[in-house]
Amino acid sequence: MEILNNNSAVLQLEETLLILEESLQHNVFYNSIEKRYIKRLKQFYSPYFDIEHSETGSYYFATLQCIKLFYLDAERPYRIPLSDKFITSMHHLFEINIHTLDARNNQSGMTEQLLFLSEIWELHDTLDIADLLVNTLIKMRSNLIYTYEGTLKS
């Protein structure tokens, strides 16, 4: 695993969030853009980014697992500054995807996690789950850059 400098790690995470955002907006993992995004994610996170490592068979979930492994876990290789809002949001996104494994039996848990996201980012104007997730990812990307730039100025 190649260890990146902080600038590269932040840009990699920002691009990963953009790929997740676009996957929700355009269902990219099921059309011609799929191969390009999957190739990019494999460049970032190999050998950990692999459909075999995703319990759901979902590249979206596999990507969230890689973000958690590379940026959030205690043994993470990239120690870039992340805000509490960002970290909390990632945990909620991860939990939402775990709840989708058995959505019928986990509706209340998933709804609770979605409400937490809406509160964190003040996204109370939509009832559409995909819109809420896309807007959350947009806010998270902005927060990532803002937090990182703030640490450079200090």
Image: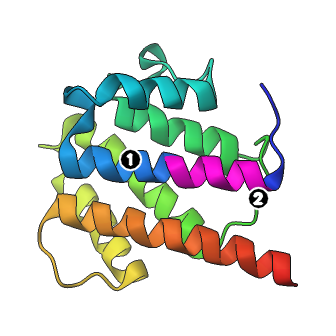
Q: In the image, is residue 74 above or below residue 146?
A: above
Where's the N terminus, which quadrant? top right
Q: In the picture shown, does residue 110 fall above or below 55?
A: below
For the point 81% across and 77% down, the residue is 151
Q: How is the image coloured?
A: rainbow
Chain part drawn in magenta: 7-15
Question: Helix, strand, or loop for circle 2?
Answer: loop
| 10 inside magenta stretch | yes
Is residue 147 left or right of 17 when viewed as pictured?
right
Q: Amino acid at mark 2?
A: Ile
Nearer-the-camera pick, 114 or 140: 140
Crowding near the residue tagged with mark 2, few <14, some 14–19, many ≥20 C-alpha atoms within 10 Å: some
- Residue drawn at x 19%, y 58% is 130
Under circle 1, the secondary element is helix
Q: Which mark is residue 145?
A: none
Task: Please say if the residues under marks 2 and 1 sit with CB atoms less than 8 Å apart.
Answer: no
To which residue does mark 2 refer?
A: 80
Residue 106 visible in the snapshot = no
* Left or right, 121 with reference to 69: left
Residue 128 or residue 74, whichever sits in front: 128
Q: Residue at x 19, y 28 (%)?
A: 31
Q: What is the quadrant of residue 86 in the picture?
A: bottom right
Whether residue 43 appears in magenta in the rendering, the answer is: no
Q: Which mark is residue 20?
A: 1
**Horizontal and vertical percent position of residue 131:** 20, 65
